[in-house]
Image (spheres, helix red, strand yellow):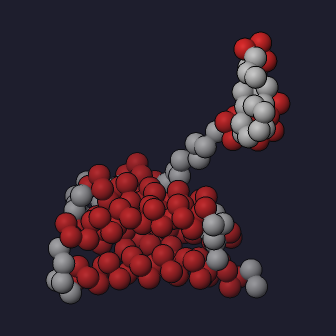
Amino acid sequence: MYDNKNSNTNNKNGNYSNNKNYQNKNNNYQNKSFDKPKFTAEFIEKGFRNDKGKLRAELLSEEAKKIADIIAPRTNTTQLRAFYGEVKALQNRIEDEEESFEDILPFILMLKSKASYKYGTKNIPIEFRNFIFSVVDEIKKVNTKQAFEDFCYFFEAIVGFSYELKSQRR
């Protein structure tokens, strides 16, 4: 029989409870923060283009190198290449005029889901996941084909610097 005085104990089957020991032992995630640190990079503040509407030169040089320095040490080159391949495939679909930017935008946004999945399966580090989130958010904010193309160049530079860093560590 159920006793109101002992409502904080396991039920007779022991399946679930309001028991504090049970909760602390099995539901520790309630006490942990799932907020991940935001990815910080100059492109988030400055965008891909300068005031004159030109692609920022430092984006493809210094900023790409800084990001490669952050993500390369912990990112498997296979995973980096796989993401880059997906981005290039989307770019090719637009360039070949098979589809418009508006047609491709949902698949660009889906890169966040793919990064979350790869992070969840421990195939990419949090820094790489946060980078993908940041660039996708920037593309969505600007909402132009040009922003996506700028990201493609930016990502290409990051991949290049990452491979250099990997080869130096061998």
Report the residue at 53% width, 47% height from top: 38
Between 21 and 51, the residue placed more toward the observer is 21
Report the residue at 19% width, 66% height from top: 102
Above-or-below relation of 163 to 50: below
Above-or-below relation of 39 to 83: above
Give left or right: position of 80 versus 153.
right
* Farthest front residue in view: 1
Can you tell which quarter of the image residue 107 is in?
A: bottom left
Report the residue at 73% width, 40% height from top: 15
Can you tell which quarter of the image residue 149 is in?
A: bottom left
* Farthest top residue in view: 5
Tell me if I can see residue 55 in this picture.
no
Image coordinates for residue 3, horizontal then vertical, percent? 76, 17
Can you tell which quarter of the image residue 151 is in?
A: bottom left
Number of marks: 0
Image coordinates for residue 157, horizontal then vertical, percent? 47, 76
Tell me if I can see residue 107 in this picture.
yes
Between 14 and 25, the residue placed more toward the observer is 14
Between 137 and 66, the residue placed more toward the observer is 137
> In which quadrant is the C terminus drawn?
bottom right
Give left or right: position of 51 versus 169.
left
